[in-house]
Image (cartoon, rainbow, N blue to C red):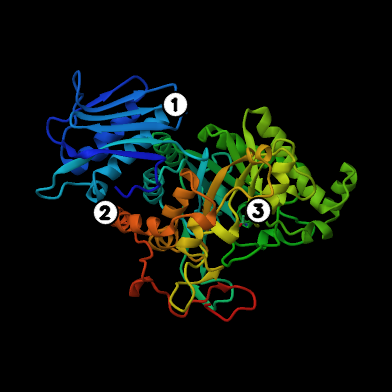
């Protein structure tokens, strides 16, 4: 049956099958209407069947079994029909995703092929996720992904039973969300006049404007679309670093006593940017205004405030920042950043939300309510979990999907480490340094897709797939220790999964390497320090 991610238990009940046909209906028990709607829309389109409400028996029957965990499900196919029981609405929805896989790769198309029939094997499947946070981060700041592409990615996440979409909405190179009270954030901050093509060392430029942003109604649509797929959207507004686009729009947010911030453009190249927010009351009030609008739009418990890669040089030179350090009785600039993040930790907690930030928020002291996205390896996550804080494991050495997926000359715009499909399959989110109690603080894991060198959807697809498929199994399935994982079996199942991805129109990296038009000869990436180029 070649399911990905692998379920906990599958029992085959003989060689028979149940056939979806014009007599097949859907019976939606209480609390399962969203999955019934999704099945009708998705399987209805591809099969051409109406899938009307079912009668007393037969067809596809959805129900809640409160004895199961919320995201767990039981799926049974008999010659009379299909039953899906979930611990809650989410479990029923994940069961429906498995049902789609059982129908075969063509079930991932959007319209019927002539003569196609839809047969399900007689099986019983019991399944539940390992982690509650199974995420992907998408950077829409470096290169904008239009709304329909974002909705498509939500479908791709749902197809892999991933349930968190971390939406990196702001950075030095662009501000991507409409904020009504600060219109210049998008008028001026959502586009740049040109873009470095390749990584920083590249001499190539894309000499045309790049931009785009989501209106508040676009965001509402994205959030509702995700919600219907049991995906939480965690928005990220990156502060106090990675903020040059905001400073371009509102120069008073920058360190005006150090540089002329009114001369800063939306940044057109890549890297860690020295132009950071000024630690003033004005900046705090400004971002409270941003977060007020954000909380109206995003119902998620978690709100990401970035906190990564904030160079302290301007604060060291700024009389105003130094006076603030003195006035607050702080020891240094790291503690000043910590003060800044703590302000928003308190502010979000007072509104019933939880702050999450990149692991640099540990420096200068972790805010009391903070959850840590551990990206510079496991270290930040280990420190945070040992201190009783929750953690999302997303180490760049393992699950940064912008990094190249093979050695050699052919990978397009090669970045950082070589991380193959097998490497991602053998990624373990819980490090051995944690005790069982501490490990409970690992909420889960996410793969991060940064887009400096991913200028369009095809490039995002190429870097993300097939590795996100392997990642989904790491996040969902109960796998043995990395060395004991049956990668050969995963590869075998992938031969079918590639056909699902084909049907979905995903331009993944083929197992044999990039197709001619997927290469980017001559465009420099960011090789590992000391290694020869493109290795
Ligand atoms: C990051 O990669 N700067 C979080």
Residues packed near mark 3 inside 10 Å, few (<14), some (14 to 19) or many (20 plus): many
Q: Is residue 62 above or below residue 355?
A: above
The verdict on label 1 being within 8 Å of ligand 1 is no
**Could you tell whether 290 is left or right of 494 in the image?**
right
Q: How many marks?
A: 3
Rendering quadrant holding ligand 1:
bottom right
Mark 1 vs mark 3: give the one in front. Answer: 1
| Cα distance between the residues tagged 1 and 3 | 32 Å
- Residue 124 seen in this snapshot: yes
Residue 145 location, quadrant: bottom left
What residue sits right under mark 1 in the picture?
68
Instruction: Say which label, 1 or 2, has the lower sequence index.
Output: 1
Residue at 13 percent of width and 35 percent of height: 21
The verdict on label 3 being within 8 Å of ligand 1 is no
Q: Where is residue 363 in the image (x, y as percent from the top left)?
A: 77, 50
What residue sits right under mark 2 in the picture?
503
Q: Is residue 422 above or below residue 78?
A: below
Q: Position of residue 70 (x, y in %)?
A: 46, 28
Q: In this view, does 479 lie above or below 513?
A: above
Q: Position of residue 194 (x, y in %)?
A: 51, 68
Residue at 62 percent of width and 56 percent of height: 248
Instruction: Say which label, 1 or 3, has the lower sequence index.
Output: 1
Residue at 38 percent of width and 45 percent of height: 151
**Could you tell whether 74 is left or right of 245 in the image?**
left
Q: Position of residue 530 (x, y in %)?
A: 64, 78
What residue sits right under mark 3 in the picture?
378
What kind of element bears circle 3? loop
What kind of element bears circle 1? loop
| Cα distance between the residues tagged 1 and 2 | 32 Å
Residue 385 location, quadrant: top right
């Amino acid at each position: 049956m070649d399911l990905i991610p692998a379920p906990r238990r599958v029992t085959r009940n003989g060689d028979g099958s149940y056939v979806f046909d014009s007599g097949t209906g859907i019976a939606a028990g209480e609390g399962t209407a969203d999955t019934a709607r999704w099945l009708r829309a998705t399987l209805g389109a591809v099969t051409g069947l109406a899938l009307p409400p079912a009668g007393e028996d037969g067809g596809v029957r959805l129900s809640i079994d409160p004895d199961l965990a919320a995201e767990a499900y039981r799926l049974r196919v008999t010659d009379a029909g299909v039953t899906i029981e979930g611990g809650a609405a989410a479990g029923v929805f994940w069961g429906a995703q498995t049902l789609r896989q059982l129908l075969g790769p063509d079930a991932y198309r959007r319209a019927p092929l002539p003569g196609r029939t839809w047969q399900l094997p007689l099986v019983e499947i019991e399944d539940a996720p390992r982690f509650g946070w199974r995420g992907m981060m998408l950077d829409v700041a470096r290169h904008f992904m239009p709304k329909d592409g974002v909705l498509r990615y939500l479908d791709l996440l749902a197809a892999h039973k991933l349930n968190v979409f971390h939406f990196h909405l702001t950075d030095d190179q662009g501000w991507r969300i409409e904020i009504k009270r600060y219109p210049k954030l998008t008028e001026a901050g959502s586009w740049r006049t040109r873009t470095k093509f390749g990584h920083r060392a590249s001499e190539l430029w894309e000499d045309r404007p790049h931009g785009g942003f989501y209106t508040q109604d676009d965001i509402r649509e994205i959030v509702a679309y995700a919600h219907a797929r049991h995906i939480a959207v965690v928005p990220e507004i990156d502060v106090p670093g990675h903020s040059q686009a905001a400073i371009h729009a509102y120069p008073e947010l920058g360190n005006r006593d150090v540089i002329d911030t009114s001369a800063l453009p939306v940044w057109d190249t890549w890297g860690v940017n020295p132009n950071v927010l000024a630690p003033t009351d004005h900046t705090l009030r400004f971002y409270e205004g941003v977060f007020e609008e954000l909380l109206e739009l995003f119902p998620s418990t978690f709100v990401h405030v970035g906190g990564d890669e904030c160079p302290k040089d301007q604060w060291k030179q700024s009389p105003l920042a130094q006076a603030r350090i003195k006035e607050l009785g702080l020891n240094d600039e790291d503690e000043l950043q910590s003060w800044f993040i703590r302000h928003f930790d308190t502010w979000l907690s007072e509104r019933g939300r939880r702050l999450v930030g990149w692991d640099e928020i540990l420096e200068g002291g972790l805010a009391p309510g903070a959850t840590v996205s551990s990206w510079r390896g496991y270290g930040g996550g280990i420190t945070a979990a040992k201190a009783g804080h929750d953690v999302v494991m997303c180490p760049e050495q393992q699950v940064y999907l912008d990094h190249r997926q093979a050695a050699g000359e052919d990978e397009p715009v090669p970045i950082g480490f070589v991380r193959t499909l097998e490497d991602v399959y053998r990624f373990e989110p819980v490090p051995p340094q944690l005790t069982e109690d501490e490990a409970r603080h690992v909420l889960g894991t996410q793969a991060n897709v940064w887009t400096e060198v991913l200028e369009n959807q095809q490039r995002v697809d190429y870097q993300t797939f097939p590795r996100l498929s392997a990642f989904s199994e790491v996040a969902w399935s109960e796998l043995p220790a990395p060395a004991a994982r049956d990668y050969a079996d995963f590869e075998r199942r992938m031969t079918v999964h590639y056909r699902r991805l084909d049907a979905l129109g995903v331009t993944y990296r083929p197992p044999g390497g990039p197709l001619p038009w997927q290469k980017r000869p001559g465009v420099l990436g960011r090789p590992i320090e000391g290694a020869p180029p493109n290795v």
